[in-house]
Amino acid sequence: MVGVEHAYTHSMLAHIRRPTLRAKKNGKLHTGSLETFLSLGLGSAENGLTLSKMPCANHEADPCSHAGIVLCPKCQLVKYCSAYCQRQHWPKHRFDCEHPMLDPCWEPRWIREEREPRFNTAPSDDLPAYDCLRLPHNETERDAIHRDFKLCFAASGDIRNLVQTINGLPAGYRGKCDILLNDVDTITVNRNLMILYALLGSGPSIEQSAEMAIHLMYSSALPPAIATYLRGCVRVIYGEGTNEGRLLFRCSLGTRGQGKIYSMQSTMAMRRPMEMFHSTYDLRKGLRSKRTTITDTRHVDDVDRAFASLQPAHRLALAHFRRKGVLAPFSLSTRGFSEPNRLMYTAGGDWLGHAGVNPLKGWNVSDVLATGAKYAVDSADIIGCLFFHVKEELMEFTRRIKEFYIDLHVTQFSPPLLSKGISIGVFPAFAEGCFDRVDTADITDREGIPELLADWGPMLNRNNGRACIIMHSRQWHRNRPNTTAQSNPCSAVMLIERCKKLPSLVCLYVCIDSECNS
């Protein structure tokens, strides 16, 4: 389904009752809705099925279709349906099971080579995804259930914080939420737009859409069915024309719910992502480029430093993801992922990622492990745990978009230009003084705090006492190596509590408690 037919089918599916159907595919009986059968094949497992449990790791000859229940006692990374499959798979699995990274005494290369480390980058300090509203600590869920919100992610980067924020809204939310998702980088913006439409557009089941979105976000290779669906999304969003002669590209896309996805961006800036989406290189070329990047000897010590901070099994799980390029449980066969993810490569097939790629840094690891346990994934397979955690988050996000009234506005402008555009009425859904939250990410590292406050302070909703600007810095503590809170944000709270106990300082502490008005 592509072009007009693709859009028409999505529109029709949104307005009809979905009967339960049964059909056979590859000799197996599948049950699901009409949506499911029109898009069957967008999952992660063999034949495009979705994953709801750990698969048997035996991929020899015909992949085993049973669930994995017998855990490898040594590495604890894979499961088998039986001792027979475990024995049959051992000649291949032994290379992972006996991998040096599983040795508790594993050491980084610079130690093994008895030399000083050569670090080219500072330790990564990516923040886990967070909810920018945190209603229990601010407006409260009871007061917020009928309240309209306007939120701005001025330098979004990706959709993780958007997902966490929507998932933090109270059950039964009946207000309207307008969210501005902006980034200055045109590839980031159009990647986000593609992922949001693939996830939220009507058509595939919510479970299939969530697994598809996981791979669009993190995997450098895709199954052919997802690659084909992605090409259809490109035609629906951008049409067949080149948009030449127009200063701005605008589109309005339906979702599963009342809300829509809107986009406004510079037509000239879109040329590069359009070339990426319509490229023709094969997966081998893309993977060669990725391999060159992640094995670059200039960054080997940076990568080993990250591995050294992990448990042995987590080291191997992350190394396996970096080598295979697919975010999935360790047991899953990835040989069906035979197409490049064109959201991750240039038009010529050069990988856009960096040597230290690590998806674990984007999520709360305790939550990741807890979700993995619900799906009987051993904590050793932390990438498998991450797969199911992100899938749950995306499914909940999609259900809420379907149930609640939420409009998403995806834009590509520099933050200062964006704030000026809002103040003069360029964006009809937003106006000066309307935002309940403005998340500016690390803009302060480039523009400075005074400039940021001048741009975004007037944008805050004066009628909401909890309206605020959220900012963080990746550079501040690096220039002040002796600061107390460099690696422990709780240190500030501990310091305040100490000050409260000193009579001479009782009036001097800085209040960060949401209940305090001092």
Image (cartoon, rainbow, N blue to C red):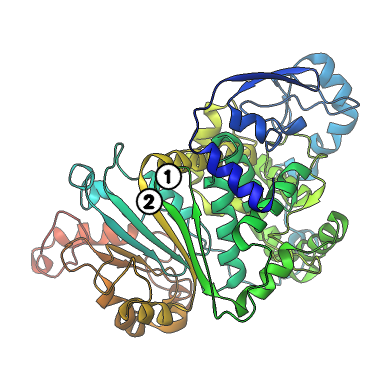
Q: Report x, y in % for residue 514.
A: 19, 55
What is the three-letter code of the residue carrying label 2? Ile
Q: Is residue 113 left or right of residue 501?
A: right
Q: Report x, y in % for residue 327.
A: 67, 45
Task: Quadrant for the N terminus, please.
Answer: top right
Task: Say few, some or many: other residues with alpha carbon within 10 Å of mark 1 (under 14 / 14 to 19 / 20 or more).
Answer: many
Whether label 1 touches label 2, CB < 8 Å? yes
Query: Disc 2 designates what residue?
Result: 406
Q: Is residue 152 left or right of residue 8?
A: left
- Above/below status of 448 relative to 114: below
Front in this rendered view, residue 394 or 398: 398
> N-terminal of the two: label 1 or label 2?
1
Query: Disc 1 designates what residue?
Result: 401
Task: Quadrant for the C terminus, please.
Answer: bottom left
Q: Residue at x 82, y 57 (%)?
A: 287
Q: Residue at x 80, y 15 (%)?
A: 83
Asked if one can make out residue 311 in the rendered structure from this viewpoint, the answer is: no
Q: Is residue 451 left or right of residue 264?
A: left
Tell me where residue 467 sits by quadrant.
Answer: bottom left
Task: Say few, some or many: other residues with alpha carbon within 10 Å of mark 2 (under 14 / 14 to 19 / 20 or more).
Answer: many
